[in-house]
Amino acid sequence: MLNQVTISGYKSLQGSTAHFSPFTVIVGRNNTGKSNLFDALRLLSNLGQMPAAGAFKPERHRGDPVESFFSEQQPRLSITCDFDLTGTPHPFTSDKDLPDPFLHYELEVVFRKGVLQVQTEKLKGHTPTANKPRAFITMDKDEKNRVSVNRDAAKSGRSRHFPSPSARSVLTMIDDAELYPHVVALARELSSWRFFHFEPEALREPSPAMDILELETSGRGLSGFYDTLASREPERFKSAERALRRGIPEARGIHVLDTGDRRRLLAVVRDDAREFTARVLSDGTLRFLALLALAYAPQPPGLVCFEEPENGVHPGRLPFIVDTLRGISERGSEEGHRSQVLVNSHSPYLVDLLNPFEMLIASLKDKGQTTFTSVGQDLFTGRPTLKSILESGEQTLGELWSQGSLDANA
């Protein structure tokens, strides 16, 4: 799980720190930096899998590289993360846990003379009882322009060395899980992250008649996913149907149709036995089906980010949306997976359904810098009147936020 991230030099994020729980909703008005946070996390995930130039390509990144830095005069961004990988299997010996589950990772990228490079990279970890963290990736002090990857303490042998700056992170160059388990575990964690902004037209598309085990960012592949789930994991498919009936009482079940051209098309069967295909289902119903697909996927992502999942959904159905989002992390934990859900939104109706500790507020400082404030930890401290208003039911959490009472300076 990603516990905390601090980002500097990226878009509106300049010394911006966000603390996360297993289920966190980032709320804020338009243009406060909510999407910038998701862009930075997506960029971090890509940097752990490919060269820096590839991570910034338009199909993977929103905005040109030159537009992505906080300062055009000093195009440099840094990302610092704290992870809790407790319960993560050892990447080489799966019947054992990762020895040092608490990892601290630092990455710095520079844009110099039109070239993107990884300038600095560090990784250290520790157990809950350790007095001193162990260093797995270090920047050499004696040998300038060199980064070292150290073997696990239980293994003998020399470290591996790489030039710095480099066109890519060392996470992309280490695949020996026996000698470097923590480096490999972090790379796998980053590669498991998924980012979604469901588009109704993509959700409506028929899918090829082939196994589809996960959705694309837009939700494309939804019909194929349910077809695969029904054949491979029938119990999960039935659970998804039950969840659909709870959220949409008039729905009886899910049916995947053969279109006759080697494609599959999703349909919802209603109580009166009529079938409505994805082509005519409402946007809200399609988005709900996509969320259920993630909730009942055989291998849920380590971290999943959703952009405004309330779009197109009637406020009366928002409780089922929030319960499904929250349930993705809860269900994953029960089945041995460490799932985490991050959502951004500007809906006061969705905020009403949250616990204050599940909520971060994004806002802009005077110089256009984004700041993230934890409602449960920060805003109610020393503000008993605000807490009393919420507990008495005089106003809801969504009303307090929408009228600005939860602003840090209110």
Image (tube, grey):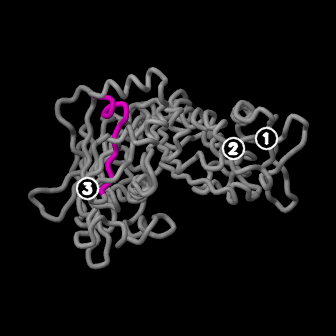
Quarter of the image where one finds residue 61: bottom left
Query: What is the residue that sits farthest to the top in this orientation?
Result: 392
For mark 1, what is the residue?
A: 254
* SS class, disc 1: strand
Query: What is the residue that sits farthest to the bottom in this orientation?
Result: 113
Who comes first in sequence, dot 3 or dot 1?
3
Q: Nearer the viewer, residue 246 or 397?
A: 397
* Location of residue 27 in the rendering, given as x and y in whole percent from the top left corner: 45, 45
As measured in the structure, the alpha-carbon distance from the residue carrying label 2 to the one carrying label 3 is 40 Å
* Location of residue 16 in the rendering, given as x and y in whole percent from the top left corner: 29, 50
* SS class, disc 3: strand
Left or right of residue 350, residue 243 in this image: right
Numbered label attached to residue 121: 3
For mark 2, what is the residue?
A: 289
Vertical placement of residue 392 versus 59, above or below: above
Q: Nearer the viewer, residue 61 or 53?
A: 61
**Magenta residues?**
369-381
Circles 3, 1 touching at the beta carbon (< 8 Å): no
As measured in the structure, the alpha-carbon distance from the residue carrying label 2 to the one carrying label 1 is 10 Å
Check disc 3 and give the amino acid type.
Glu
- Residue in view at x 30 percent, y 35 percent: 100
Vertical placement of residue 236 versus 16, above or below: above
Mark 2 or 3, which is nearer the eye? 2
* SS class, disc 2: helix
Check disc 1 and give the amino acid type.
Ile
Vertical placement of residue 339 versus 137, above or below: above
* Location of residue 129 in the rendering, given as x and y in whole percent from the top left corner: 24, 26
Left or right of residue 334, residue 239 in this image: right
Does the magenta-highlighted stretch encompass residue 377?
yes
Who comes first in sequence, dot 2 or dot 1?
1
Residue 180 visible at all:
no
